[in-house]
Amino acid sequence: MRRRTFLKGQLAFGAGALLGTTIAACSAPAASPAQTTPGTTTTMPLDGSESAVAPGSKVLLAYFSRAGENYYYGGRTNLEIGNTEVVANLISAAVGVDVYRIEAEDPYPDSYPATVERNVAEQDSEARPAIAGVLPAVDTYDTVLIGSGIWNVQPPMIMRTFVESVDLSGKTLFPFVTYAVSGLGRTIDDYTRLCPQSTIGEGLAIRGEEAAAAQTEVETWLRAVGLLPA
Ligand SMILES: Cc1cc2nc3c(=O)[nH]c(=O)nc-3n(C[C@H](O)[C@H](O)[C@H](O)COP(=O)(O)O)c2cc1C
């Protein structure tokens, strides 16, 4: 198995298998996944005066974010709110979107090295970590903003679970990520491969440490992808 280790300073982000087969990517699952808890989709008020989205068009923002011990300018910090959640909040404050938070049925550890270790194992085994709660009904959305941190230069494996569990065919996906050093990494390639029947639009990469100050970058991106007026 091909392996690599991504190192920055003293911190290993992870190592894992880089290749794997995919199943039923971005199409409806054959059977509903076992979900036992209510979903977490919340509707943000749409201010029509600020949105360039065509009337009747709906936007879903789906994101995964992990609070706890994390990378911070070469050291570590304890995040009360995950960096991607901070960016998701900036997006939902700027445009009308329905927000779905992707949560792991088996929550990731608070510990950074333990999370790195689990991610390595999940990448190596091509795992599809189970999502807690009910998946969103995506049929009414034309556009999906899909966000996560970058784990070992790619979105966490739970994002594969997500795109393989809901039918995103015919929709436009705009990926956004927060990261330490890798930028979008392999995000665009991953979603392009996983979602061949979706259009993958321009991505946004925000450095995790700068998430709270990223409003201008976020709004520039929202304008570029047509969700805010130019
Ligand atoms: C398991 C793990 C692996 C990571 N791997 C990378 C990486 O390869 N490249 C990178 O730039 N950042 C990496 N990071 C840093 C995160 O991408 C960054 O802190 C991000 O903002 C976390 O988002 P979140 O707080 O929303 O989960 C990693 C973090 C974790 C926990």
Image (cartoon, helix red, strand yellow):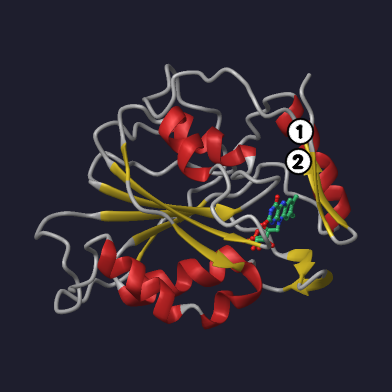
User: Looking at the image, which is closer to me, 133 or 161?
Assistant: 161
The correct choice, above or below, for 74 with respect to 165 in the image is below
Locate residue 178 relative to residue 115 in the image: left or right. Answer: left
**Dot in front, 1 or 2:** 1
Where is residue 177? Give x, y as percent.
Answer: 53, 57
Locate residue 71 relative to residue 23 in the image: left or right. Answer: right
User: Looking at the image, which is closer to me, 134 or 53?
Assistant: 53
User: Looking at the image, which is closer to me, 184 or 122?
Assistant: 184
Q: Secondary structure at mark 1?
A: loop
How packed mark 1 is, by other alpha carbons closer than 10 Å (few <14, some 14-19, many 20 or more), is many
Q: CA distance from mark 1 to mark 2?
A: 8 Å
State which quarter of the image contains the C terminus.
Answer: bottom left
Q: Look at label 1 and name its amino acid.
A: Gly
Residue ID at (61%, 43%): 154
How packed mark 2 is, by other alpha carbons closer than 10 Å (few <14, some 14-19, many 20 or more), is many
Residue underneath mark 2? 119
Residue underneath mark 1? 16
State which quarter of the image contains the N terminus.
Answer: top right
Where is residue 199? Give x, y as percent.
Answer: 29, 39
Residue ID at (74%, 24%): 125
Residue ID at (46%, 72%): 89
User: Looking at the image, which is closer to me, 228 or 202?
Assistant: 202
Give the residue at the far left of this rendering.
55
Locate residue 30 relative to residue 74 in the image: left or right. Answer: left
* Proximity of marks 1 and 2: CB atoms separated by less than 8 Å: yes
- How many marks overall? 2
> Residue 215 sits in which quadrant?
bottom left
- The residue at label 1 has a CB less than 8 Å from ligand 1: no
Where is residue 80? Give x, y as percent.
Answer: 70, 74
Q: Look at label 2 and name its amino acid.
A: Asn
- The residue at label 2 has a CB less than 8 Å from ligand 1: yes
